[in-house]
Image (tube, coloured by chain):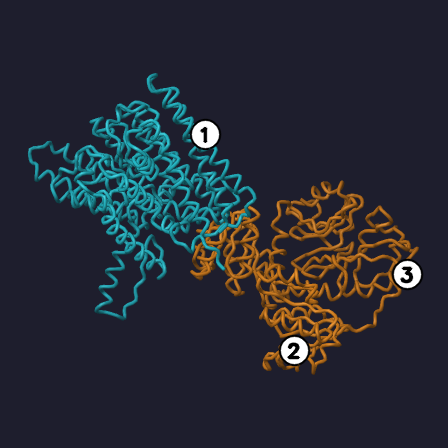
Chain colours: A cyan, B orange
Amino acid sequence: MNFGLVSRLLSVVLIIISLAFTLCLCVSIFLDEDANQTLTTAAFAVSLATSLLSAGILYWIGRKAPQRFYRREALSVIGLGWILSSLIGSIPFLIITPHIGISGAIFESVSGITTTGASVLSNLEQLPYSILFWRSLSQWIGGMGVVVFFVAILGFLGAGAKLLYANEASGSTFDFEESRVQSAILRLIYVYLGLSACCTIGYRFAGMSWFDAVCHMFTTVATGGFSTRTESIAAFDSASVEIIGIVFMILGAISFPIILAALNGRFRRISTNTEFKAFGLILLASSTIVSLDIAIEAPGDDIVDTVRASIFQTVSILTTTGFATEDFARWPSLPQAILVVLMIIGGCSGSTAGGIKINRLVVALRLCVMNIERSFRSRVVRQIRINNRTLSDAATQEIGMYLILTGAIFLLSVQVASVFGIGTDMGTNLSAVQACLFNIGPGFAGVGPTETYDSFHSGTKLFLSLLMILGRLELYAVLALFAPSMWKRLD
Amino acid sequence: MKIVIVGAGEVGSHLSETLSLDDHDVTVIERDPERAQTIHEQLDVRVINENGSSARTLRRAGVEKCDFFLAMTSRDETNLVSSSLAKALGARTTFARVHDATFRDNSEINHQRHFGIDHLVNPEALAAVELAKRIRNPGRVAVEDFGRGKIEVQSIEIQEGARIVGIPLLEMKLPGDLRIGLIQRGETSTVANAHSVLQVGDIVTLFGHPDSLFEAKPLFDPDSQLSKKIGITLLSGSEISISLVRLLSNSRFKIRVIEKDLKLCRSLAESLPNATFVHGEGTSLRVLEEEEIGSADFFIACSKDDEDNIMTCLQAHKLGAQHTMLAINRADYIEVLDKLSFSLGLELAVSPRIATANEVLRYIGKKSFIELEEGDKCSTCIIELDIGPKSKVSGKRIREVKWPSGCVIVGQESNFIPRMPTGDDVLQAGDSIIAIIGKDKLKELLKLTK
């Protein structure tokens, strides 16, 4: 393991976090009310100083490192980078909202950076602007990925950039149309920036203030789900805000290379993209069923309002954003059951969304169909194809293993979360684990959209934080950190 | 630069690595999924896992906008088809790796023009050129060659008693089409012209066919021996061996080839009558002893198996062969062999892959001309440049052109055949010429040929 280079790259991760802190510092100086200003300014100054100092130390450790960069290094940079930035990111919460405690601060910070959107904070309206801004900004950084942001700039990484991108952004670099991986990633970043700009303007024209528009843009395109209001999007009670939200949540959950292809006018690539079509189909089917069921079960309500709320909620959950315009924890059981499934599915690969990703679902379904057919027709030979490409046996096996591993972790986590679960019921634990592992945020029962995660034991909060990072990095980058052979010298 | 490479074998992957590290935009087309995966993980290149001779794939790879198209698979036909298609789709310069000598035989049809391929490269032949250079000039370090070994450059110091001292070049009778390019006298060097007179102690740079160069040596250095035969033993009748035997066709080379396949021995003996073929397992000590390898001047192991090559070279060195050289296919081995070459007694390790990469890299420069050799102290350089379609010199005889002062044309490649030009030769657009020129006059020459 090339510890020096890992350390140097971690310092770059911290530089990105420092830049974000600098923005927050500006917000605290210019926007915060006088009563809070000293505290918030001090808080972000301390955070910035800590982050820069750590970056300096890490850079110094790795200053002479050779530039050998393989899988081990990539996985540890990503795993450690996310843990480190979550820890550093919790400093502002520790100082400005001390009542949530250390575990609460870490939970909030992780929830931000992993774009989960689960919160331990209530009464958001009373918090200073700067901390709300940091909550949202952290989701925007986490949406694209802390590492992806610098991968495009560091020229020496070469093919290492592919490893970093593939492990952090869950996208395949095989479909890139650029010959240099770094210029391809740079284009994706431009897409992200473009979406962000459009989204901000959209929200502003839909009636939000500039501050709200920027903060909600951060959490919409990143499919994060933090809001500046306790009631989330419901607080604005505006159809146009919701429509803008729906559009950009969907865009955020579509594979970025596909958006890029659309912008370049290559619609053939889109029409042959299985994942995109499946995403559309799932979205359409689920929102129709949810609307119909609610309309039938509550015939008195205005039909337009019902449809609006149903679509918004379905999109918000499928894209793993977690905005709420309605307390879906109080919905009838069929729509709830659908939402539970959508939470697991998530968005497309190579997007900012969480979940198990639609391409894996499609492959898994095809594998199932193939195996059923094979049970009575053992000689048949079929290839698993997705996005116009044939998957190798190793790739399909990997997807199968990933799903099994996710299932195992899910079940095991429910047990662990229940260890300290005095006072919380089974349904709440189950839903909390699901909402964190798949990066959604709000769940059902005790963690519904109107509730917070504050009531959990601090041990559970830390465990849920780990689950969020596991989910965001698709397991391996974090699990590898716990594998002893990753750190041993190969003798 | 945008470069598309077909085939990620040893040659293709080595080229992709070198070029991508040089900050070129590289796209690799490879049909085998496993190889595609490997190269995708290891290099910063775009990989397309499809058939390289399909026009659709080529279009996807963006050949219409690419500067260089390199077809480097191990199959000649695939390379010819894909580079021909690429040229038709709009690739600027195409290279095809071709082993079969029939595609180089332009007597019936000009294959390069027919397929629209700008350069044919043969890794094995290039490796053989490297080996032949060292055999012809033992001990010399830098010998440059152009036109795939057809034109060689050598520097010779004029010794006491040389017959050509004191005669102007105009009246000098040199064998073959030999040209004298540079004359270095003391610290200064000048470009030779018809009235230059040579003195003892001058160092002259000669251009010409390797055999003419050898024949001319006694004119400059009376002590050099012409008559001595050189015994060369080759391990295995591989493509490198065959190319080497062809290159060393001069009768002063006595060549023996040890090959274990009897059928191959027979067919080679038929097509290469000037070499002796020995049927036997070259790795066995007994065969080597029976063939008295110890008395050979050169032992060259060029079988396809790297490990066999290394071991038999060590054997030959131990048995007493004067110079041992070998061909190495896996580029991974080159570095360690270079380091150990002295203690193992290996004089030269040549890799067809690296030779190909170097040949291709010669062309993939940023300049419109290629600098072949640069004198450090002197103000002259040797350059290879192409004659543009609208150039003033095209269609004229060399003697009719008003060349910049101090410029000598020492080589010409017309219709893909390299040779030594005379004043009566006609220059045509698309030809490439090799010229010696003062650096200050370079711009004038570039303007003239553009």
Q: Amino acid at mark 2?
A: Ile
Q: Residues within 10 Å of mark 2 (few under 14, many from 20)?
A: many
**Viewer can see residue B159:** yes
Residue that mark 2 sits on: B258
Residues behind callouts 1 and 3 on a single chain: no
Residues behind callouts 2 and 1 on a single chain: no
**Viewer can see residue B63:** no
Image mark for residue B5: none
On the image, the x and y values in percent for residue A323 come to: 24, 35
Q: CA distance from mark 2 to mark 3?
A: 41 Å
**Which label sits in the foreground, 1 or 3?**
1
Q: Chain of mark 3?
A: B
Q: Is residue B106 above or below residue A351?
A: below
Q: Amino acid at mark 3?
A: Ala
- Looking at the image, residue A346 sits to the left or right of residue B293; the answer is left
Residue A289 figure quarter: top left
Q: Residue furthest left?
A: A300
Residue that mark 3 sits on: B162
Q: Are marks 2 and 3 in contact (CB under 8 Å)?
A: no
Q: Residues within 10 Å of mark 1 (few under 14, many from 20)?
A: some
Q: CA distance from mark 2 to mark 1?
A: 73 Å
Q: CA distance from mark 1 to mark 3?
A: 80 Å
Secondary structure found at label 2: strand
**Which label sits in the foreground, 2 or 1?**
1
On the image, the x and y values in percent for residue A256 come to: 36, 42
Residue that mark 1 sits on: A49
Q: Chain of mark 2?
A: B
On the image, the x and y values in percent for residue B281 come to: 61, 80
Q: Amino acid at mark 1?
A: Ala
